[in-house]
Amino acid sequence: MEINLKEKLRALRHQKNVTQEALANHLGITPQSVGKWERGEGFPDITLLPRIAFYFDVTVDELLCVDKVKREEAIGEYQKRSLVCQQNGDNKGNLAIWEEAYAEYPNDCRVIEGLMFAINREAAYPCPKEKADRIIALGEELLQKSTDVRQKERAIQRLSYIYDGIDKEKALYYADMSGSFNITREELRSTILDGEEGVKACQSYIMSLIHTAAMTASGMTSKIKFSHEETIEAYRFAIDILKRLYSDGNIGFYAFYVSYYYRNIALQYAEMNDTENTLKVLEESCKYAIIEANLTDMDYTAPMVNRMKHKKSDTYKNYKGNACNLRLEALKDKRFDFVRNEEAFQKIIADLKEYAE
């Protein structure tokens, strides 16, 4: 069993911004003694170990790095189980896994982050106050404990999203802490890398930008009360830029979003009692939902993304079934009652049911 107290003690001090003098004062010893421990020139009296562990809010085993391999294996297993739940849209099961992990490893930043996102995925929208409070507490704990820049960035973004609708000032505070959109990691890689790797980095960055633009255009419709025409234009813009990127029609994973955007356009036409356009757009929504339902591992083939691949195992779902299940549920909306008996509507229902899980 390897005991590596010197590095662990130094890491804990830096993590909590504690000086050797402050720790020594707490323990009633000299700063020189702490210095010797961190240089590996001595070891604390065994009676001091519980006090040191308590001071840093860790267990004695964690302080001594005992069972580190066991902990890594356990957390790895939690992550694997979580991945299966996310791929199956089992949000309750995913939350139960991370609650169990947090009970066992409450100070591990990977577990804190896992639980934070699991609560967020399981919560309804808008997020209930009790769950929002937990997400905020976990996010702020992660900011204090984590030394991983990317992990801290994810926590900042989640805090900004959660505070939106609760406290706009706090939401903007965290938004301003987040990395600049103009200097993203993807942009830097696309600039720095050359050759085939450079092309891949450029294509990955382009995909990210287009997807962000599509999501932003669709999200704009929730900011104020738009007219039907304005709302339709926003969703068509989102669809058009995605179709332009995947110009050969091999849209892959993004078929899910295109299906969703068409569904929202159909709702606008339904509110206008426009039978022809409602059915026409619903047919498009159905078409792309079926594409998503049949999605497997694939290579994108359009010129601007032909180095990119999609693995179905990388898709994390916030729902059970596939896009066809979601569209069937959406078509229960009373706004579609005026076309419910139309032959075209019944065919859409039948086609979706054929591919729903």
Image (tube, rainbow, N blue to C red):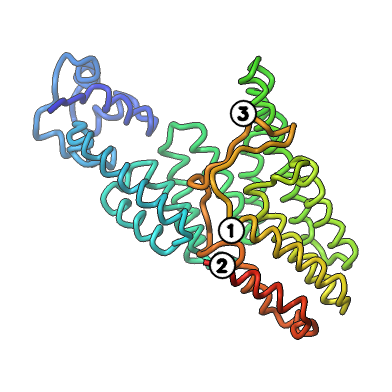
Q: Amino acid at mark 3?
A: Arg
Q: Secondary structure at mark 2?
A: loop
- Residue on which the image places disc 3: 185
Disc 1 marks which residue?
293
Where's the N terminus, which quadrant?
Answer: top left
Question: Residue 115 at x, y = what percent?
Answer: 41, 52
Amino acid type, callout 2: Ala
Q: Earlier in the sequence, mark 3 or mark 1?
A: 3
Q: Is residue 141 left or right of residue 211?
A: left
Name the side, left or right, on which 122 lies relative to 344. left
Q: Position of residue 246 (x, y in %)?
A: 74, 42
Residue type beneath disc 1: Ala
> Badge 3: few (under 14), some or many (20 or more) residues near its Cα, within 10 Å?
few
Image quarter of residue 107? top left
Ranked by sequence position, the earlier of labels 2 and 3 is 3
State the separation of the CA atoms marked 3 and 1.
Answer: 32 Å
Is disc 1 surrounded by few (<14), some (14 to 19) or many (20+) residues within 10 Å? many
User: Residue, x 22% and y 34% (percent of image)?
Assistant: 69
Location of residue 313 with respect to 257 vertically, above or below: above
Q: Which label sits in the foreground, 2 or 3?
A: 2
Q: Residue at x 42, y 64 (%)?
A: 92
Task: Assign a secondary structure to mark 3.
Answer: helix
Q: Are marks 1 and 2 in contact (CB under 8 Å)?
A: yes
Left or right of 13: which side holds 31? left
Q: Quadrant of residue 2?
A: top left
- Residue identified by numbered label 2: 356
Q: Earlier in the sequence, mark 1 or mark 2?
A: 1
